[in-house]
Amino acid sequence: MMEDNSPKVISDKIPFYRDIRFLKVFFQILFIIGIILLAVFLYSNMLNGLSKQGTELDLTFLNSEAGFELSEGIDFDPSETFLKAFWVGIVNTLKVSILGIFCATVIGFFFGIARLSSNWLIRQIASVYVECFRNIPLVLQIVFWYAIMLVLPGVGESISLFDSIFINVQGVYLPSLEGTAGLIPWVWYLLAGIILAIIVVLGLAAYRYFFQFRELHETDRPSFISNIIFGAKWVAAPIFLAVAIVGWFLTPEVPFELLQPELQRFGFVGGMNFSPEFTALLIGLAVYTSAFIAEVVRSGIQAVVKGQREAARSVGLKESQVLRLVVIPQAIPVIVPPLTSQYLNLAKNSSLAIFIGFPDLFQVGEIMMAQTGQSIPIFAMIMVSYLIMSLTTSAFMNWYNHRITRIGR
Amino acid sequence: MRKFLFRVSVLVLAISLVTPLLADDHGSVLDKVKNRGKLVCGVHGGLPGFGFLGEDGKWSGFDADFGRAIAAAVLGDPSKVEFVPLNAAERFVALQTGEIDVLIRNTTWTLSRDAELSTDFAPPTFYDGQGFMVPKSLNIESITELEGASIGVTAGSTTELNLTDTMRSLGLEFKSISYADIDTLYNSYEAGRVNVVTSDKSQLVARRKDLKNPDDHVILDVTISKEPLGPLTIHGDNKWNDAVSWVVYATFFAEEHNITQENVKTFKTENPEIKRFLGESGEMGKKLGLPKDWAKQVIISVGNYGEIFERNLTPIGLPRGINKPWTQGGLLYSMPFR
């Protein structure tokens, strides 16, 4: 028998179980099924556990009367619902997070730039700041700031600045601006001022465009838009200001008045105030996060190639201009992504408020859990709230990052 | 090799999915405690007289002693308890999740907690009421003078709700500041951050002793609520709740009949009920799923109710008040041992 020496014919049809196109889809589907099964298992396990305890998942409790008071935040009455109480907590968390992010960014940029200063002392101070606050646990820092608040003088011996700002153990009290009966007429004057300014600017722009520069050639003639900008700058702003000032005196009553905090039996009443809990939390979050932001900023600046800096100097820019016009704009795209994580951390860390009694989202949630026993739905609500906040923040920061990288490169 | 790894990972996944099902234990907490050989008891961490971790690392207090009494009844050894300090807001979650077997932490018996919190109460061990503590310098005598005050309170407690109810019904404006941690609460009261602190009177008395100048603070004469405090077990575990309840009754019963830590071992009696109590006759222990001499063990380890009270609460200056046996005009009433 003759041996077959011809090469084996390979079928060009690959069996489906070795076809990469099939396998790709197959494993994806398998994975999704696995995830779904796991979710179903966890969910049924939870229901099982709940029924064993004799409770069931029921959200109607959210509409019943809360019955407890919250120390600060938007207006809240104990007769309002648990849902409203939760909302107060969310607003408090947002308030402290947004203010915290703002302060942390300002302080962080300052120390980040200071770490690269040519001045030895400034550089050292900045590194000590960063290393201290970055390496001490945040809980300790917040409790520390709260302890500082509690050694402030008592109500009777308040520190007073200009007889209108008072600082004591119950917080910082500032006069607040309150609208009076004169406010609404004044707003009408402002609106009138705006309308007048728009009419004048449009008229002026039309005059300049159609008459004053008529002789000039199309390409040399300032565009209509630039005429509007010219008018807005030199004519509209003064007109608006003049109307606003005249209106201020024409209204029957001065539109605003300062409401001074007044000392009563238990403390100051009226005006604006920052509670010690809020202040301690804000300082703690801002200082802690700013140390991280300082490092982010420093690394971002150092990521800009040296040549850029040298080139900027060689065309005669001052040191501050080098930083402002050349280095920072190129550092920003490097800084933004890690900065986003710091912002997210700050918002989540605000849940440490529970240690000092600031009624943030997490503390209100804990109180609700204790008062209703509905731990699981409330935990879920807390998680979803933080998730939404974080996702919104990072979506915004991604959008911003996208925009600046597009402009910058 | 790859196939092998694949199989191993499938196996691991399968095991991890099934194990929680197998571990799911449908028995009573009573059996769980017996098998474990240890009771896990949730207590207050910072309340002298009730639940307090001393500098020597030993737990002391009225509530802690009831935890020991339960361990003595179930396991025959009062030292087989692990105490878990909990704050007001955490306590029910810890009980619901089975992290602790019993919660003895100044917890007030209310309808909502009984009905919707998936917890069951054992008889109250201490009948308390909510009061207010203020600095003497404010010269306050009645609650109506508290208009506009900042009032400190424990977050997630009934006192928080009673405070709001009372102030609302009197039409008084106030500000309440809730602290999760009791030490922070009293620190901020002492610093003047809050003008007033409100809580169970027993707690106010206990914590006033720890303030820098206890004499500068007064507890107002008013009581705004009923606070029956007692142990809690998980809802629906009747066997375990029965055991805990009867340990409490045993301490009442012993005081009613003058059975003390000292004389219990040699107590001679012809009274059939006391004989049943001491395990000398009848099947009381068996009915509860406890050893025959469970009640005797309770008294040997912590004494009767009066002795527990005198050891823990008399030193901090709490009068017995209504926490006396019914035979002396109090509210403590043991159900019959029959």
Image (cartoon, rainbow, N blue to C red):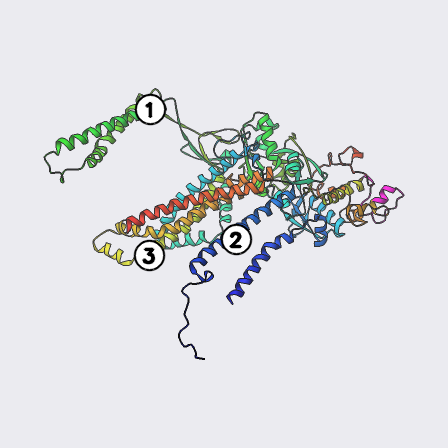
Q: Residues within 10 Å of mark 3 (few under 14, many from 20)?
A: some
Residue tagged 2 = A34
Label 1 marks a residue whose chain is A
Residue tagged 3 = A303
**What type of secondary structure mainly makes up the magenta span?**
loop
Q: Residue at x 39, y 24 (%)?
A: A180
Q: Residues within 10 Å of mark 1 (few under 14, many from 20)?
A: many
Circle 3: residue type: Ala
Label of residue A172 in the image: none
Circle 1: residue type: Trp
Residue A399 lies, in percent from the top left, at 36, 46
> In the image shown, does A281 or A53 lie closer to the viewer?
A53
Instruction: Name the residue at the left extreme.
Output: A215
Residue tagged 1 = A186
Instruction: Name the residue at the bottom extreme.
Output: A1
1 or 2: mark nearer the eye: 2
Instruction: Name the residue at the right extreme.
Output: B270
> In the image shown, does A331 or A393 lie closer to the viewer?
A393
State the SS at label 3. loop
Q: Residue at x 34, y 19 (%)?
A: A252
The answer to whether dots 1 and 2 both sit on one chain is yes
State the SS at label 1. helix
Q: Between marks 2 and 3, how big is the CA–CA gap? A: 43 Å
> In the image shown, does A352 or B260 lie closer to the viewer?
A352
The answer to whether residue A5 of the structure is visible from this angle is yes
